[in-house]
Image (cartoon, rainbow, N blue to C red):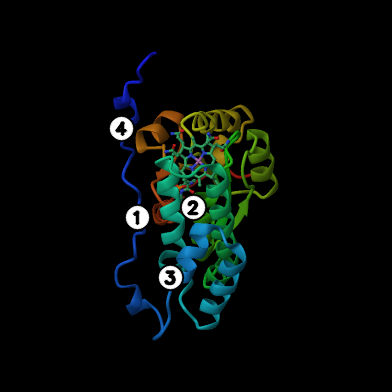
């Protein structure tokens, strides 16, 4: 009888990802407050508890950015690391993302309300074939907080839809998010379509998403690349001041 070579079964997987507790979170929270239950709710995808706990945090006037960084991100990041390490799979990741989005939906209007004046119109979306929307939702929130009127087209956005919306809204800036090495290509395609439609000089275009780089942004003809939401806002504020051709 054939003997199995047991060395194939001694596989040691990647280290189990751990919860990264935000340093100094106690100093940013009211006395007696705890985030642990929210970290666990986002981790396990309990969107109902997430909604309740974020509402509670808001009612205690905890800064929305603190809610995002100290309350929502730890549990989500833990699942994201587990997903990347293939410790969990799409269903678990999806429910964690749903809980994250329940929290984001509550803090979005608060951050937008802190903005002083409309500085410009920004159309954003995730490119064709790509369903990832957490990153671009955070960019949206930060842009709104900086005073932009943001039209978020969601995920899997066809180039024509970006163009039609930019034209309809007389957009100043357009942003394409992509998280897959297979879909970043559509950032380039969408920029080419703006060119073909005769609208490239009317908007400033930003690209972003984990697999993108400044080199990629240069190669695909974008006006800028944002490594994160803070970067995206800085760039958008700079680019909205630069001259563009008028929409009609
Ligand atoms: C959550 C997630 C999912 C969720 C998405 C849920 C949702 N509603 O978004 C689900 C489970 C659906 C999913 C599906 C898939 N996923 Co996925 N996913 C992730 C994961 C874990 C986190 C992504 C995320 O939300 N990050 C957090 C946000 C805050 O970061 P971010 O998106 O990078 O955004 C920041 C910046 O990039 C920047 N930014 C983002 N957009 C923009 C736009 C502009 C204009 C600017 C300026 C800046 C900017 O600012 C943001 C905020 O700071 C990543 C791994 C990881 N750790 O990144 C894999 C990952 C992206 N997924 C991956 C894969 C392979 C898939 C699937 C193909 C799996 C499969 N076998 O089916 C499918 C693809 C489905 C599809 N067609 O899109 C791979 C991609 C590998 C590659 N290089 O192509 C990754 C890297 C995991 C891995 N290591 O294997 N995924």
Q: Is residue 164 above or below residue 95?
A: above
Q: Which residue is mark 3?
A: 36
Tell me which label, 2 or 4, sits earlier in the chain.
Answer: 4
Tell me which label, 1 or 2, sits earlier in the chain.
Answer: 1
Alpha carbon distance from label 1 to label 3? 14 Å
Alpha carbon distance from label 1 to label 2? 40 Å
Q: Which residue is mark 1?
A: 18
Q: Secondary structure at mark 1?
A: loop
Tell me which label, 1 or 3, sits earlier in the chain.
Answer: 1
Q: Nearer the viewer, residue 81 or 88?
A: 88
Tell me which label, 4 or 3, sits earlier in the chain.
Answer: 4
Q: Inspect this view and state whether residue 197 appears.
A: yes
Left or right of 20 on screen, residue 48: right
Q: Residue at x 39, y 13 (%)?
A: 1
In this view, the mark in front (2 or 4): 4
Label of residue 240 in the image: 2
Q: Are marks 1 and 3 in contact (CB under 8 Å)?
A: no
Local crowd size for mark 2, using a 10 Å CA cut-off: few (<14), some (14–19), many (≥20): some
Residue 72's x, y, as percent? 47, 63
| In the image, the residue with mark 3 has its CB under 8 Å from the nearest atom of ligand 1 | no
Q: Residue at x 46, y 75 (%)?
A: 63
Q: Nearer the viewer, residue 244 or 203?
A: 203
Residue 105's x, y, as percent? 60, 63
Q: Secondary structure at mark 2?
A: loop
Q: Residue at x 51, y 61 (%)?
A: 42
In this view, the mark in front (4 or 1): 4
In this view, the mark in front (2 or 3): 3
Q: Secondary structure at mark 3?
A: helix
Q: Nearer the viewer, residue 94 or 233?
A: 94
| In the image, the residue with mark 1 has its CB under 8 Å from the nearest atom of ligand 1 | no
**Image quadrant of residue 104?**
bottom right
Q: Which residue is mark 4?
A: 10
């Amino acid at each position: 009888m054939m003997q199995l070579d047991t060395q194939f079964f001694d596989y040691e997987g990647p280290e189990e990802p751990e919860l990264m507790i935000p340093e100094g979170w106690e100093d940013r929270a009211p006395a007696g407050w705890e985030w642990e239950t929210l970290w666990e709710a986002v981790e396990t995808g309990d969107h109902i508890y997430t909604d309740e706990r974020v509402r509670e945090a808001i009612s205690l006037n905890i800064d929305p950015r603190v809610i995002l960084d100290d309350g929502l991100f730890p549990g989500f990041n833990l699942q994201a690391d587990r997903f990347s390490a293939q410790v969990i799979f799409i269903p678990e990741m999806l429910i964690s993302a749903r809980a994250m989005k329940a929290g984001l939906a509550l803090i979005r209007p608060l951050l937008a309300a802190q903005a002083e004046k409309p500085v410009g119109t920004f159309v954003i979306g995730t490119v064709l074939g790509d369903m990832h929307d957490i990153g671009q939702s955070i960019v949206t929130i930060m842009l709104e907080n900086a005073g932009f009127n943001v039209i978020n087209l969601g995920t899997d956005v066809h180039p024509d839809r970006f163009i039609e919306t930019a034209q309809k809204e007389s957009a100043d800036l357009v942003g394409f998010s992509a998280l897959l090495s297979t879909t970043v290509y559509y950032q380039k395609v969408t920029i080419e379509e703006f060119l073909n439609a005769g609208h490239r000089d009317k908007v400033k275009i930003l690209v972003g998403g984990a697999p993108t780089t400044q080199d990629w942004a240069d190669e695909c003809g974008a006006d800028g690349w944002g490594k994160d939401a803070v970067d995206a806002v800085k760039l958008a504020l700079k680019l909205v001041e630069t001259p563009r051709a008028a929409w009609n």
